[in-house]
Amino acid sequence: MLMKDVKVSNGTKIIPGFAGGKNNSVNIKELLKDIDVRRLRRSSLNIYPTDYCNRRCPFCKLTGVLTTEEDRNDMTMKDIDTIIDFCKRSRVNQISILGGEPSHHPQIVDLIERIYERGLCVGIIFTNGIFDNDELIKCILRHHIPVNMNYFPPDEYKDGQLELVHENMRRLFLESGDLKGMVGQKLSKGRKFALSITFYKPDQEYQYIIDACLKYKVDSIRWAASHSSTTQENRHVDFGLLRQMVPLTVNFVRDAIKAGISTGEECGLVPCILTKQEYRFLSRFTRGFIFRCEPILDVFPDLSVHYCMGMPIVSWITKENTLSQILLEQMIISEYFRRRPRSKVCLKCEWWQNKICQGYCLQYKYDKDNPEDRKLLAGLKWIEDRRQKSKDRCVIHST
């Protein structure tokens, strides 16, 4: 749904097909009350240069969407120019590169150079580190690009992969120099590199990633509890298992802090599963420890723009629209679902009443079989089409 579909009827803005409201519509003015319009200004955008990945992580939110190498879709240089044009008219000066595995894009170095040639910069590259591309490493070092590397338990790597990952860590993290004061990059307290871990089982091991940080002088770890992919085929932590993950995350953060490593959370928990002591500890020592989400804005090779890969709210880049328009559209739709309580318990919760908590992931707020929900969630059709095309070729983890 594009914002051009938002119409005015008798002075009231409505979205045709919205469930709840007179004539099957809802008053947008009511939803806008809980939207901070200041958040419509963003300085960065995420792109997925390829939908191919050389791993199939059990917790991946792209499960059901990733393709095989022979069936992959890659951004072309024309596509990246279209995205850069979009960024320029949206006053966005930074593009972050995610995936899929971006290092396996056949023109990844040319793509990065094009971003810089046209006056933008790369905010961060998110990679699993399993690549043998000397030119990419030189490019990252030349432009002082921050790197976030997803690092797995050593026994999960195939022959030769672990050695390759460690060599890339050595070159990227130890030979890079200091990025403090870098123009065009907002690096909090000089923080330039991070390793990443996703928790999906209560007894998960994590000491290996702390050891790697100490070895390669990485001062930050990004962590998250695994949330469901849209297809719900990945290993994820649903609400019933969430409390069981708390001791793991608290112990992890405590051990990281003791080692002199800071942590940052992605994808919020919920406060009702935490004791006061746990809440105070995590909120003090974890960056980004919040209980509500906003559009992440991930751009796929087909120029579709996703709220996130768990919540199927999708827009598309056109020749005329801007990032603020897409943000407003996705915020309105997500706010509609955010107002749905996860259960009756939420209605009595002060965190919910004060709009501090949204009741865990929005993934659990919609019904894919509800016609009204489907009208708003264009991503459901997008996901289903991709699953149909790749179901015989894409390896899926069974939960």
Image: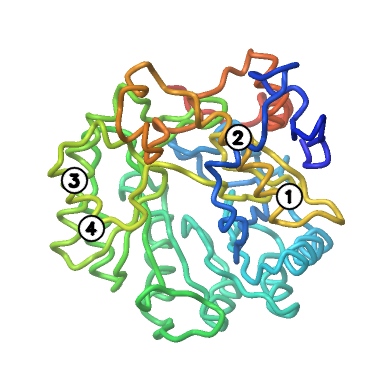
| Residue at mark 3 | 250
Q: Is residue 271 left or right of residue 96?
A: left
| Residue at mark 4 | 285
Give the CA separation, mark 4 to mark 1.
36 Å
Label 2 Cα crowd, 10 Å radius (few <14 / some 14-19 / many 20+): few
Question: The N terminus lies in which quarter of the figure?
Answer: top right
N-terminal-most mark, 1 or 2: 2
Rendered location of residue 130, percent (x, y)? 49, 57
* Amino acid of disc 4: Phe
- Mark 3 or 2: the one toward you: 2
N-terminal-most mark, 4 or 2: 2
| Residue at mark 2 | 30
Q: Is residue 205 left or right of residue 236?
A: left
Query: Vertical placement of 243 versus 219: above or below?
Result: above
Rendered location of residue 174, percent (x, y)? 36, 79
Give the CA separation, mark 3 to mark 1.
37 Å
Label 1 SS: loop
Query: Vertical placement of 240 versus 336: above or below?
Result: above
User: Mark 3 near mark 1, Cβ–Cβ under 8 Å?
Assistant: no
Give the CA separation, mark 1 to mark 2.
35 Å
